[in-house]
Image (spheres, grey):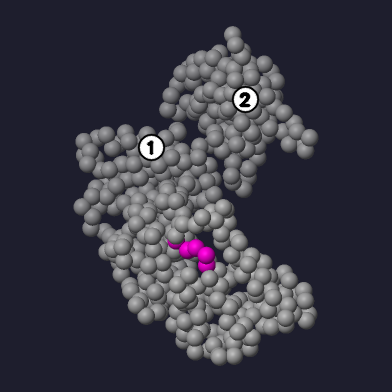
């Protein structure tokens, strides 16, 4: 509630529910009975769904204010276009209601569903609620009504429900549908073909249900894939219901393997595409530490293992896919950068796995994450080198360090040290100092995105190997890289995009 004028009338935003008059709340009926003025929106044809819902509660002595939209789906010659025409309408409509309120009359603005959920009432509320005593009466939304009419849970447990307007661009719809557990898409009508395409593109079309005019005359329920786009009205929604207790198909002729990158840490670093692949998988395969970053979903099977069995893990995933399972191989960072994509593709090149589909989905790399935290050290050419000599000789690493450093490239050094590898960082520092000045900036980034995140900028000469472990990545600047401390005390590193003439 809010209020400014004690002698003025009171404003109500009255939620009427999804259409069936019996679903109006007791409070909504009370407020309509108390009101002097009943206001409702309508198109230019004059019919108002809101008024029809509340019709039996509207008396002959009620003052009715019909707020007629100047434009709905048609074009307008207003100099401000559609937005300008609507802004002018809302200003004029709120002024009409304010005149009643100033005269001491109580005004009830009727709204289908809930007044503050994609409703027209909110435009009146924003213009009047700070000036007059106001109460909003919540109503049953079309989302709740659709789920009830389908008779299926909308979201359960820790599932995430996403509400989307069908007016979003198709790519945005596809990404959001791929990354959520359950969803409702509003405002269909002319957007239906686009929404259907987005559901198909996100791999969710088979799960989607269609609800038209829930609880109203002419209600229709259907599998969304079977609905003719030409028959869809505005008052319809697409529903992706809860996946809990949904049986995952087990008898596919052929499964697939998707190698996904989780980024350097937790869920904030997942891409929408990766979220969708993880949600759709029957089986998750990966290093246990990386699997722990992925939300648990009913019906999925997790196969965790040690970090040193990459080949075995890849073959295990491919064997599952041969049996018709959808398998997500979970990798940290980007799966193609010192990670699981290579192991899976190497195994998939064997004849027995030739028919198993394999996809690789990108993730945020440790280098990119650390660079963003520090500023822009990778702003020019750079090289990525792993200091681990477990899979290649140190002599090869040293040769590559010399070559990249002599070419004046910024260096992203992965796998710099561990409990069993303690001398590589010190040796790499010695090699790099043969080509770089002692004060060359080095970003020492540990556990970026995690609870133990620590990002520091040190001089190359001051790089301490004792502070480096397997959860650390090093970004070593070129001769052009600069470390700058700003007036607020923050220090950042950047490498200019322009390189000086020889």
Q: Name the one closer to the observer, 244 or 385.
A: 244
Gap in Å between the C-alphas at discs 1 and 2? 30 Å
x and y percentages locating residue 368 in the rendered image: 54, 35
Percent x, y of residue 166:
44, 59
Q: Going 73% across and 71% down the picture, which residue do you hit? A: 131
Q: At 40% across and 75% down in the image, what residue appears? A: 214
Magenta stretch secondary structure, dominant: loop
Question: Of the residues under marks 1 and 2, which one precedes in the sequence?
Answer: 1
Disc number placed over residue 495 in the picture, else none: 2
| Closer mark to the observer between disc 1 and disc 2 | 2
Identify the secondary structure beneath mark 2.
loop
Q: Report if residue 133 lies within the magenta region.
A: no
> In the image, residue 98 lies at what x, y percent?
69, 74
Q: Tell me where residue 183 sits by quadrant.
A: bottom left
Q: Which residue is drawn at 24% across and 47% down?
A: 322
Q: Quadrant of the N terminus?
A: bottom right
Say if 206 sits above or below 221 in the image.
Answer: above
Find the magenta span and give its range: 69-73
Asked if 68 appears above or below 160 in the picture, the reply is: below
Relative to residue 101, is residue 493 depicted above or below?
above
Crowding around mark 2 (Cα neighbors within 10 Å: few <14, some 14 to 19, many 20+) is many
Q: Which mark is residue 79?
A: none
* Circle 1 crowding by C-alpha within 10 Å: few under 14, some 14–19, many from 20: many
Q: Where is residue 16 in the image (x, y as percent from the top left)?
A: 52, 80
Question: Which of these two is toward me, 41 or 458?
Answer: 41
Residue for badge 1:
341
Residue 143 appears in the figure: yes
């Amino acid at each position: 509630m809010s209020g400014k004028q004690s002698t003025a009338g009171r404003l109500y935003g009255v939620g009427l529910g999804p259409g069936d008059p019996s679903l109006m709340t007791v409070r909504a009926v009370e407020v309509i009975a108390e009101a002097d003025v009943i206001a409702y929106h309508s198109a230019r044809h004059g019919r108002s769904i809101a008024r029809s819902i509340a019709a039996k509660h509207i008396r002959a002595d009620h003052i009715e204010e019909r707020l007629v939209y100047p434009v709905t789906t048609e074009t307008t010659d207003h100099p401000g276009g559609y937005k300008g025409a609507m802004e002018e309408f809302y200003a004029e409509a709120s002024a009409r209601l304010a005149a009643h309120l100033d005269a001491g009359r109580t005004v009830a603005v009727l709204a289908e569903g809930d007044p503050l959920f994609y409703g027209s009432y909110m435009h009146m509320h924003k213009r009047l609620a700070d000036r007059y005593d106001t109460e909003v009466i919540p109503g049953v939304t079309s989302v709740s009504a659709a789920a009830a009419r389908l008779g299926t849970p909308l979201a359960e447990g820790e599932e995430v429900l996403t509400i989307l307007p069908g007016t979003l661009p198709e790519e945005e719809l596809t990404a959001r549908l791929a990354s959520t557990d359950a969803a409702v898409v509003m405002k269909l009508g002319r957007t239906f073909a686009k929404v259907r395409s987005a559901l198909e593109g996100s791999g969710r079309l088979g799960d989607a249900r269609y609800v038209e005019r829930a609880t109203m005359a002419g209600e229709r329920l259907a599998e969304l894939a079977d609905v003719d786009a030409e028959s869809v009205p505005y008052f319809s929604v697409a529903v992706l219901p809860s996946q809990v207790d949904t049986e995952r198909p087990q008898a596919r002729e052929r499964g697939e393997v998707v190698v996904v990158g989780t980024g350097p840490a937790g869920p904030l670093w997942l891409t929408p595409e990766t979220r969708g692949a993880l949600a759709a998988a029957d089986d998750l395969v990966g290093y246990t530490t990386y699997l722990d970053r992925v939300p648990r979903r009913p019906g999925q099977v997790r196969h965790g293992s040690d970090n040193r069995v990459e080949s075995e893990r890849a073959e295990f995933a491919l064997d599952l896919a041969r049996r018709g399972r959808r398998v997500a191989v979970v990798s940290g960072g980007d799966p193609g950068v010192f990670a699981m994509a290579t192991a899976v593709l190497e195994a998939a090149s064997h004849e027995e796995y030739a028919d198993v589909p394999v996809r690789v989905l990108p993730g945020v790399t440790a280098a990119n994450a650390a660079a963003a935290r520090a500023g822009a050290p990778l702003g020019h050419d750079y090289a990525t080198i792993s200091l681990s000599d477990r899979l290649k000789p140190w002599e090869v690493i040293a040769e590559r360090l010399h070559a990249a450093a002599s070419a004046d490239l910024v260096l992203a050094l992965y796998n710099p040290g561990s409990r069993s590898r303690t001398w590589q960082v010190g040796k790499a520092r010695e090699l790099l100092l043969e080509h770089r000045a002692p004060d060359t900036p080095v970003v020492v980034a540990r556990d970026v995105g995690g609870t133990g995140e620590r990002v520091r900028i040190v001089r190359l000469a001051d790089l301490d190997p004792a502070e480096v472990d397997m959860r650390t990545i090093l970004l070593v600047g070129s001769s052009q890289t600069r470390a700058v401390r700003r007036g607020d005390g923050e220090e950042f590193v950047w490498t200019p995009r322009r390189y000086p003439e020889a």
